[in-house]
Image: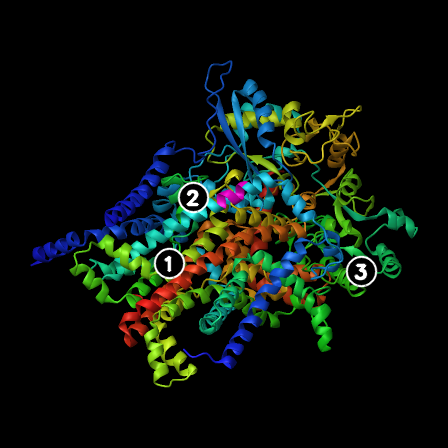
Amino acid sequence: MASNKRKRWALALSLLLIAGLLAACGGGSDSGSGNSKGSSGGGQSSESGEKPVELIFAMPNPGTPMNDLNLVQDEINKIALQKINATVKFTLIDWAAWNQQINLMLAGNEQLDLLVTSAYMNYSSMVAKGQLVPLDDLLQQYGQGIMEAMDPVFYEGTRINGKIYGVSSFRELVADYGFNARKDLLDKHQIDLSQVKSFEDLEPIFQLIKEKEPGIIPLVQRNTSNTVVNDMIASRVDNLGDGMGVLMLDDNNTTVVNLYETPQYQAAVELARKWYNAGYIASDAATSQEGYVALMKAGKGFGYFSNMKPGFEAQETGLIGTEIKGVRLTPAVGGSSGPVAFMISIPSNAKYPEKAMQFMNLLYTDRDIMNLLTLGIEGKHYVKTDNGQARVPDGVESSGYVFNQWLIGNNSLTYVWEGWDPNQWENLKEFNRNAVYSPALGFLFDANNVKTEVAAVSNVISEYKAGLESGAVDPKVLPKFIEDLKKAGIDTIIAEKQRQLDEFLAANQ
Amino acid sequence: MRTNAVQQTLFHAIMVALSAACLFPFILLFVVSFSDEQSIIINGYALIPDSFSLEAYRYLWSQLTPLARAYGITVLITAVGTVTGLLISSLLAYSLSRDEMPLRRVLSFLVVFTLLFNGGLVPTYLVYTEVFHLKNTLLALIVPGLLTNAFFILIIRTFFKMSIPGAVIESAYIDGASEWTIFSRIILPLSLPILATIGMMLTIAYWNDWFNGLIYITDPKLYSIQNLLNRMLSNIQFLMQNDLGGRSSESLARMPMNAVRMAMAVIGILPIICIYPFFQKYLVKGLVIGAVKG
Amino acid sequence: MNQSRWRKFWKRVVRHRILILMALPGLAYLVINNYLPMLGVTIAFKEIDYSRKGLLNLLFGHEWIGFKNFEYLFRTDDAYTITRNTILYNGLFIVLNTIVAIAVAIVLNEIRNRIMSRLYQSLILLPYLISMVIVGYLALSMLNVENGFMNKTILPLLGIDPVSWYSEPAYWPYILTFVNLWKNVGYLCIIYLAAIVGINHEYYEAAVIDGASKWQQITRITVPLISPTITIMVLLAIGRIFYSDFGLFYQVPLNSGALKSTTDVIDTYVYRGLMTLGDIGMSSAAGLYQSAVGFVLILLSNWLVRRRSRDQALF
């Protein structure tokens, strides 16, 4: 009868629901791992006879094509299995979702053995919350390779409260700032950039371009966080992590001050405003949704400020598609945030911290693994050129694996990509060695005691920063900005930071 | 009701104006997805761009595998989620609409209460991942959405009470029908408008959901279309606003351009627009039945 | 006496066991999805130490710090701005959206031509399906200072100078209200239309026989008969009065700081403040604050509704 059928149907559905839940419950019986997709690397045998261990490694999704990640992962694991009897499973997490997902993963019991960390992603808060494991002992035991291969700053510069919580990737830790422009326009108007010695010197050039090239923006702002003002004063400031209370490197002291009250900031803002009014900066710079690369590519911009490094022009030329020439206007300076920009850490959820450190060690010593990770599989994703560099294989339109050479590990072990100076890594090491470092190198601020003020000050800064620093807003609001900052509690933050900095300096004499 | 030409014209005029306002941005969206990227950067979004280009769709075609999979996932979870959610909701709403239901007031309150208080993201996440191990499974995309809006239950319950005369149910009882029979043979057919309505809303909710995908799924094989689109757009925004020491430009340079973002939005919406007329049929059907029975 | 009441109760349960069975799946879901996590609301009062993991620890462990996590919501000047903005916007949205949605639903119902009616319905639903991020880009195409539709085409037509939309807070209450209405009217309309469709035609026929005009039919029959639906929708909206559509207030103004005074609401404030800290305790505190206020308001409104008409109250 129809009613029986309905009855059974509804009953079945309810049971199905309950059953489904039970299945999900029972299926993931291993309470240690929440990953139902990955298998624990049990199938492969190895020489030592012990069961190999699977490590979970979370890293930000570089945004480049990574379709062949599994293939690359397999190749890496062949080597890793042999050397340390462990395999690795890379988990890519989108930048935008990073904070959310990592916090959630760490709040639960999910297995996570290795993690990319960064000052841009709340490194010090993570340490304060107990999310990361101190690495000092592990480094001594299993990380000798790291300590031998890398300059101490790469792992000492990450200390918080005396303990190491992350190992930095090999890259330039310092930056010099300058101006970059399209070579074709430079040649056309016979502009010689080598004559330019300071940011102010650029003014007549901007004027020239404005007159002779209507429709082209003389000075393109990189984006709304790397503003014109930021790029002009960044080399004179150590922003001590969050920019709320900084060290002015010009003055060569260790007094933490409010950046927005300094004469340097005021001067920079006024200069930007002058340029904005003269039309050298795009009128929508404060809210533009286009990055400078897109604008330059479209032929809409003449030049831009940026932090640079050896080989920078080659990189930019590749990105933008037309030759870029640059001039460096500041010396290379290293703020305290250099080493902590990109590191690898071991989170408190790690199931196999010793193996994790062993794998980390490989990332700093094993040439093959690093080449696999950053370049892909030889023959498929890259081929070697005659002089030992790497290039795209013939006939390949879009690669299935494009990573980068600054995020993870010891990149000086890898082949240099074609188009860059073959001595790129040596150049970077020189660059790092010869720069001027902030007195606060290695200091990391723990904001826990002032988190209320930090939240309030963040909001104030976000209100004024984009407008003031692109020149779109009149500097006459600067006094109000400073007043709002004070009301939000910036002086409290500065006092706390000064206190911690003094302690740090005293302890590290 | 008597027809009145003037009134009809007025109503049509109002609706045309409204529809135009709603359609215009969508047309813009559509046109931009076919525009040449350079002209977008130079001139902004334009109804009639300088030059057209299929580049955006060509790019999407090159990503066919992940896109097709995302589509499949979305369709699956929408279909299963909508049917299951509708069933659970109507069953619960029916039981709450019957005066004889024991604990009716208490249970109604408990249902409404969930609308007001939420445990928060972290506890919910932990319940689903630690207790039920749903991370990176399809169930994680279906279960949380079944009843996020308890107000659907309230609406259905109200409909049952208001639109279904008690007399009909009484006589059914007298004729010896069971609750199941009453539910399936009387209530459901009479409720087609409301079921189509709530069904439509569930479909839209599942189709558009990106949040559950964001927090419960890290395996790209299980991304739904909206999850994919949202991640891509948020990543672009994130990199625009957080320079990562100059590194963002590298990643940004390779991320989909304006036209592609619009194209993704278009393919994300199209299926739903096609399905909607299907639901509408039931809304109308209900109207007809209501008129006859009335 | 107690024993006999208990037995009576059980008899009722057994007699209506099928009804209870029907309610079970839904109730089970609510327990899992809503009530279990509710236990975790205590996070708002704690300092989370990540070296202690898992759900049990979350519920019962960690250090209690009282109301410290709530401070950032109240201490600053911003607190007044964001609260004021949140309430005013939501209040306006509720009133405006409800009136317009009902009006449109009535108009749609009146249109004889079924095909056109369905077409209109589909079209006005379109905005709801577009994500707010895309809406932000579309708004940019209209309001961009250089080549936005407004500045390039419309304003010159009217002889007005271009406006720097993203730097002038004053316009944004209108812009955001309009966008919110545009996005939601189609969706809300569906609900009210479904309610209208359920009204028994006999009422109208009788009214026509009595010589009632269209306007009278609308105000005396349609609106009163869908008032249960209206009541529920408004009550629930009031309960959510402290929550905002994050996409609307964050994406559409393109996260532009200059507009803060008129576009910052509790949700965007919490989000911005916590990007640097990632503090779960603080964001839970914000969530609790919003829920608590909404709860009180609903209780109040529900009580008011009950006094007028018992049936229509939520509980």
Q: Earlier along the polypeptide chain: callout 1 or callout 2?
A: 2
- Identity of the residue drawn at 74% across and 59% down: B43
Contact, mark 1 vs mark 2 (Cβ under 8 Å): no
Look at the numbered disc 3 and give the secondary structure of its residue: loop
In this view of the protein, which residue sits in the foreground, C214 or A354?
C214
**Apparent side of residue B126 relative to residue A214 in the rendered image (left or right):** left
Residue B145 x %, y %: 41, 50
Look at the image and give the residue range highlighted in magenta: B69-74
**Apparent side of residue A197 relative to residue C35 in the rendered image (left or right):** right
Query: Separation of disc 1 and disc 2 at Cα?
Result: 24 Å
Quadrant in the picture for the C terminus of chain B: bottom left
For marks 1 and 3, give the one nearer the viewer: 1
Label 3 chain ID: A
Q: Residues within 10 Å of mark 1 (few under 14, many from 20)?
A: many
- Identity of the residue drawn at 65% across and 23% down: A368
For label 3, the residue is A280
Residue C209 x %, y %: 35, 83
For label 2, the residue is B140
For label 1, the residue is B195
Look at the numbered disc 1 and give the secondary structure of its residue: helix
**Apparent side of residue B142 relative to residue A167 in the rendered image (left or right):** left
Q: Are marks 1 and 3 on the same chain?
A: no
